[in-house]
Amino acid sequence: MRPLKKSIILVIGLYVLSYGVLLAYDFFRVPFDGLVAGWRYHRVMGIVGVLGGLLVLLIRGFRSRSTIYQNISLSASTLVFLLLMLEAVSWIIIRTQWLPAAKPRHHLLNDARDLKSHRRPFWGYFDQDLAFWRLPNDTLSVGACHGETIYYKTNSYGARDEERTPASTTGKRVVFVGDSFIEGYMVNTPQRATNRLEQKTGVEHLNFGIVGTSPINYYLTYKHMGKKFEHDAVVIGLLPANDFEDYTHRKRIGLIETPIYRPYWDIKSRPYQLKYSLDSLGQSAYSLEHDRDHTIVHRTIDHVYRSLPLGKKVHAAFMDNSYTYQLIKGLRKERVVKVNKNYSRYNDYTEAEWEVFAHSLERLFQEAADKQILVMMYPILNEIESYAETKQNRIRNQIAALCEKYQVGFIDLLPYFHAYEGDWQDLYVPCDGHWSERGEELVSEILYNHPLYQNLLGLNE
């Protein structure tokens, strides 16, 4: 027998033996879950087997008497070598943080243990309808990047607010729904705009803002939470900067990086149907089930991967494991910011994104049809700077028209922020981007003095 054949047989034998040992080890331990030392050995050994088979084919091609086979092997070897070198260079660049890019997660090869939180999450996937919410009577304190300590506390309904009763005991009440800016993410509770307004007016301002959400969540929060409380008016906060970032089924591949239970509108159906990104709340990262058993998430990732068509599976494999892929992705994102310094979601969105955005607002307007409604829209810092340069505000007229259709009040805070006489940067926490205490104060001043808000609360009667 030729030495090459002997070597190939020996390598195959060692491969089979190694695979058998791993399989036996996994079989005789509890649980029998396809993991050894946190790695999915079936997929790892599968990759090793494919690479080994490719190497054998290349060697046979070089040893072939056919010039065609030799050329094919040479071309394939050159391509593989270049790809490996590119991957090695990308690994060095990302590891040394020379250019901005995230490391691949390798969730298709490991147990996604990097998603395991060190403590039960304060914000998490805790509600079957709302998806992202908080647990009741929970507390958290964090050291903010500007040196102050932020204290978070929830009431018995999971809202970051004072304890409220379903029935009003003080007369008129107003419900606020929105994202992290409404929640007052980077300030202590007494400094938030809603708390300042409640103190000024004597009218209860129930705050149902929640970080990391968009209009579809505002609608669900109001429908399943806000409506439990007697109230007369609703204020909806909109942040164009990320309110278009809804989940769609086209983004399913992203669940491999972080499986989350997000609501979305199925735009293929008419009328749009409400669906969720995963089959159940417990499959989500940062859920209570995951907090108790982190193996749920890697099983969910595997389920998502198996449900993808072949082309998406190849895409997912590169996204999850390739340093070159992540480097290109990071550079593309950085290029958008640098090439278009005036990029602003006030102007840069597609009609398809607008349709979904508007549909969520319309559903919310319909849900609160018997209440007075006020919509306020606010910018992040770079959108004020963009507006100062371009004076463009495409979204304003579209939202104003939608609000007029439903007889809803609308306040665009962008011109007020632009007209602020101090430094715009003082309105935002420098290393975070949310409103600072001065920003919260400005918002409360704008609303308190605005005729639409005064009419909403009956302050001008």
Image: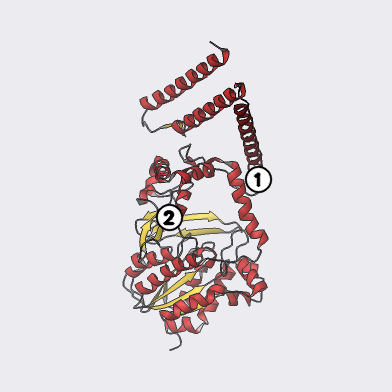
Q: Neighbour class for label 2 at 10 Å: few (<14), some, many (≥20)?
A: some
Q: Where 193 sits versus 457, above or below?
A: above
**Residue 226: mark:** none
Q: Position of residue 211 (x, y in %)?
A: 48, 60
Residue 354 can be seen in this image: yes
Labels in figure, total? 2
Asked which quadrant contains residue 434, the reply is bottom right
Please give the residue where the numbered disc 2 appears in the rendered image: 249
Helix, strand or loop at mark 2: helix
Helix, strand or loop at mark 1: loop
The disc labelled 1 sits on which kind of residue? Gln
Residue 118 can be seen in this image: no
Q: How is the image coloured?
A: secondary structure
Q: Nearer the viewer, residue 411 or 145?
A: 411
Asked which quadrant contains residue 66, the reply is top right
Q: Where 283 sits versus 346, above or below?
A: above
Q: What residue sits 53% from the left and 54% below the top?
A: 142
Q: Nearer the viewer, residue 60 or 97?
A: 60
Q: Nearer the viewer, residue 395 or 313?
A: 313
Q: CA distance from mark 2 to mark 1?
A: 32 Å
Tell me: 354 left or right of 287. right
Q: Position of residue 335 (x, y in %)?
A: 65, 56
Disc 2 versus disc 1: nearer the observer: 2
Q: Nearer the viewer, residue 49 or 386?
A: 49
Q: Residue furthest bottom?
A: 461
Q: Position of residue 283 (x, y in %)?
A: 38, 47
Marks 2,1: beta carbons within 8 A: no
The disc labelled 2 sits on which kind of residue? His
**Residue 97: mark:** 1
